[in-house]
């Protein structure tokens, strides 16, 4: 039924289901529907609705009455739906209501779309096409005075603002009709305008010109005399320059020529607001080297309800997800809800963050999924690494009650949901095979941009590009590590930086920098966060992988993990867990499974092993010493 509804505000306030009028009930109930329709698709706070309905004298039971009106309107608009399911047209959100219809289902928004499109066409020189759209818009508005709406909302500024929109649109139409030599086609509109705005000088001047150009010169002169008398009697003023010019032209038998476009005093309605963004600043940082990832994740999100961007620490998952969310924001009427869980420690922290962002009191009834059931939004769960089970349960619960909420997740591992789509995000390429050479490497471009921010004036010449490429290779092309290294350019030369990268875990940190989560302040902190996500068995085996080369097979893992303190430790299962959590990469070669670790991750494991064995200066250990 929803798609067959149409709402009229610009004449008699009413709703039709196809050709059948819907009974909207008593005046206050009709007024509530009109208020929602004036801002179709937008959340209107309950307090604002109550103020518009009762002005300065709300009844003691105003809140109860408003909710009663909503319930009755829902029953009228969705008569065939069960009571608890009548939430598709008037949608609830915390302390707000929204009329969820398309813009074309409300005559006011159709009028605004047509006038907006006409102005754009006129700006581009397509005046005839603009004229046709303005004429169509004028035909939608059947009552210039908005008599019914004004009676429902006495004293409401909304009605006066709407009347001004009508005057502006019709004045544009009349002016354009005169410029195009089509005065006969705008005579009726000019008559209506002149009757509605007797003291509006531009309106009256255009009306006189239309009368003259359609052979009604005598009527125009009589009309002008009446205007002069009314201005003197009511305002005590003489006609302004536009009316004076029209008078001179009429006296000499020539019609006044309207001013060139754009017409004076045209008030353009504001552009519709973007869907909301809750949860921090959406930002607009340019992504480097992630064009394919951005396009593919955006496509996945359009086709799947849950998409997880998974990858190793520091590979840029959050930056990519934010870019995808910005691109997808307009696809959701309720915008984006971003929940950054970098600082969350428990499931209760997740709930508290969601309640805060949704403005829910701690004692509100119903869980978070129920609160999101009527929303059309993108839920961005960022940095869920150590709370994957909690977030998996939340996303699954939301999916059960709403088909209009999509979830975008960033984590070192997938959530494990059957309907989840996973995009594995690798580091930026550390080697180049493209025609652009080393300078075109995304990692090199990222380093150059961040180094210029740290040291204004820094430029990458032919002598520097090779050294920067070497630095990026030593750091596996991890965006976080590359940025941390570039930050050091504020105080160091490239040569000094290369020497210090023998120990990147100690070198790469942001001392004194604010505005970043703790795990992004140093490479070591980012890797320790990965360690915190491991089970005891996974952690025990991961540390011992530091004794192996960066490339290894299952047999080598069995040898270093043979002394595990767990009975019958299943090495394959543990390795699969480390692969899922983006600490180890699985490769298939000649029918054989092999494994690999990033250089920085391998150094981290080796350092942990050295500390465990009491040899913090050691790096890689012979396998035989551990078995």
Image (cartoon, rainbow, N blue to C red):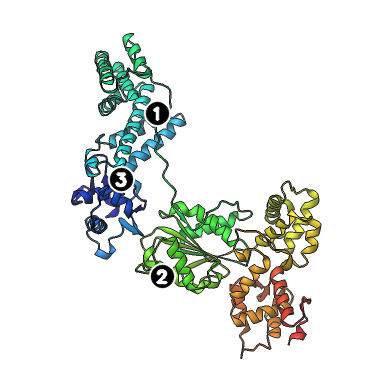
Residue 106 image label: 3
SS of the residue at dot 2? Answer: helix
Q: Position of residue 91 (x, y in %)?
A: 32, 57
Q: Position of residue 156 (x, y in %)?
A: 28, 42
Pick the front one: 465 or 225: 225
Q: Position of residue 540 (x, y in %)?
A: 65, 82
Residue 397 image label: 2
* N-terminal label among 1 and 3: 3
Give the image quarter of residue 520: bottom right
* N-terminal label among 2 and 3: 3
Q: Position of residue 67 (x, y in %)?
A: 26, 58
Q: Is residue 435 visible?
A: no
Give the residue at x 25% y 20%.
233
In the image, residue 382 sits, relative to residue 14, either above or below, namely: below
SS of the residue at dot 1? Answer: loop
Give the residue at x 64% y 55%.
289
Pick the front one: 5 or 251: 251
Q: Is residue 26 visible?
A: yes
Residue 526 image label: none
Give the image quarter of residue 87: bottom left
Residue 14 shown left or right of residue 485 in the figure: left
Tell me the crowding category of disc 3: few under 14, some 14 to 19, or many 20 or more residues within 10 angstroms, Cα based: many
| Mark 1 lies on residue | 265
Residue 365 shown left or right of residue 11 in the figure: right
Real-space CA distance between mark 1 and mark 2, rounded to the nearest whole angstrom: 53 Å
Tell me the crowding category of disc 1: few under 14, some 14 to 19, or many 20 or more residues within 10 angstroms, Cα based: few
Eye-nearest disc, 1 or 2: 1
Give the residue at x 34% y 43%.
109
Residue 380 shown left or right of residue 615 in the figure: left
């Amino acid at each position: 039924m929803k798609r067959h509804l149409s709402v009229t505000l610009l004449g008699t306030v009413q709703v039709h289901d196809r050709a059948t009028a819907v009974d909207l009930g008593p005046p206050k109930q009709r007024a509530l529907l009109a208020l929602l329709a004036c801002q179709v698709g937008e959340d209107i706070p309950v307090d604002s609705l109550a103020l518009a309905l009762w002005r300065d004298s709300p009844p003691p039971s105003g809140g109860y009455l408003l909710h009663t009106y909503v319930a009755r309107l829902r029953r009228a608009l969705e008569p065939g739906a069960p009571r608890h399911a009548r939430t598709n047209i008037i949608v609830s959100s915390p302390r707000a209501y929204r009329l969820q219809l398309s813009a074309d289902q409300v005559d006011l928004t159709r009028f605004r779309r047509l006038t907006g499109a006409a102005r754009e066409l006129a700006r581009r020189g397509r005046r005839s096409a603009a004229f046709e759209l303005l004429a169509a818009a004028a035909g939608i508005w059947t009552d210039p005075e908005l008599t019914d709406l004004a009676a429902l909302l006495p004293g409401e500024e909304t009605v006066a603002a709407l009347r001004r929109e009508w005057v502006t649109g019709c004045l544009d139409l009349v002016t354009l009709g005169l410029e195009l030599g089509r005065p006969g086609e705008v005579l009726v509109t000019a008559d209506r305008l002149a009757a509605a705005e007797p003291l509006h000088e531009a309106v009256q001047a255009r009306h006189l010109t239309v009368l003259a150009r359609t052979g009604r010169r005598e009527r125009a002169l009589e009309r002008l005399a009446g205007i002069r008398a009314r201005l003197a009697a009511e305002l005590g003023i003489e006609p302004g320059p536009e009316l004076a010019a029209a008078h001179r032209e009429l006296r000499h038998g020539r019609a006044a020529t309207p001013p060139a476009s754009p017409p004076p005093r045209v008030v353009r309605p504001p552009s519709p607001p973007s869907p909301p963004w809750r949860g921090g600043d959406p930002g607009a940082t340019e992504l480097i080297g992630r064009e394919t990832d951005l396009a593919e994740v955006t496509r996945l999100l359009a086709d799947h309800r849950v998409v997880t961007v998974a990858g190793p620490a520091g590979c840029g998952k959050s930056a990519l997800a934010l870019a995808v969310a910005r691109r997808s924001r307009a696809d959701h009427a309720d915008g984006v809800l971003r929940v950054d869980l970098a600082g969350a420690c428990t499931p209760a922290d997740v709930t508290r963050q969601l309640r805060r962002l949704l403005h829910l009191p701690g004692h509100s009834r119903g869980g978070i999924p129920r609160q999101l059931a009527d929303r059309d939004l993108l839920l961005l769960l960022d940095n869920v690494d150590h709370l994957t089970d909690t977030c998996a349960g939340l996303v699954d619960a939301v999916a059960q009650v709403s088909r209009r909420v999509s979830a975008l997740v960033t984590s070192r591992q997938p959530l494990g949901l059957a309907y989840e789509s996973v995009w594995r995000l690798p580091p930026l390429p550390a080697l180049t095979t493209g025609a652009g050479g080393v300078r075109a490497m995304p990692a090199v471009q990222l380093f150059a941009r961040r180094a210029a921010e740290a040291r204004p004036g820094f430029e990458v010449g032919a002598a520097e590009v090779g050294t920067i490429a070497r630095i990026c290779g030593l750091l596996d092309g991890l965006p976080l590590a590359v940025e941390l290294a570039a930050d050091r350019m504020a105080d160091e030369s490239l040569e000094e930086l290369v020497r210090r990268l023998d120990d990147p875990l100690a070198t790469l940190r942001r001392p004194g920098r604010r505005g970043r989560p703790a795990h992004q302040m140093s490479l070591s902190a980012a890797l320790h966060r990965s360690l915190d996500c491991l089970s005891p068995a996974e952690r025990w085996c991961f540390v011992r992988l530091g004794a192996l080369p960066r490339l290894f097979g299952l047999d080598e893992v069995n040898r270093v993990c043979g002394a595990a303190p767990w009975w019958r430790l299943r090495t394959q299962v543990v390795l699969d867990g480390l692969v899922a959590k983006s600490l180890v990469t699985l490769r298939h070669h000649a029918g054989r499974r092999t494994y690999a670790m990033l250089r920085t991750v391998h150094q981290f494991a080796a350092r942990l092993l050295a500390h465990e064995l009491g040899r913090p200066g050691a790096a890689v250990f012979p396998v035989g010493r551990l078995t």
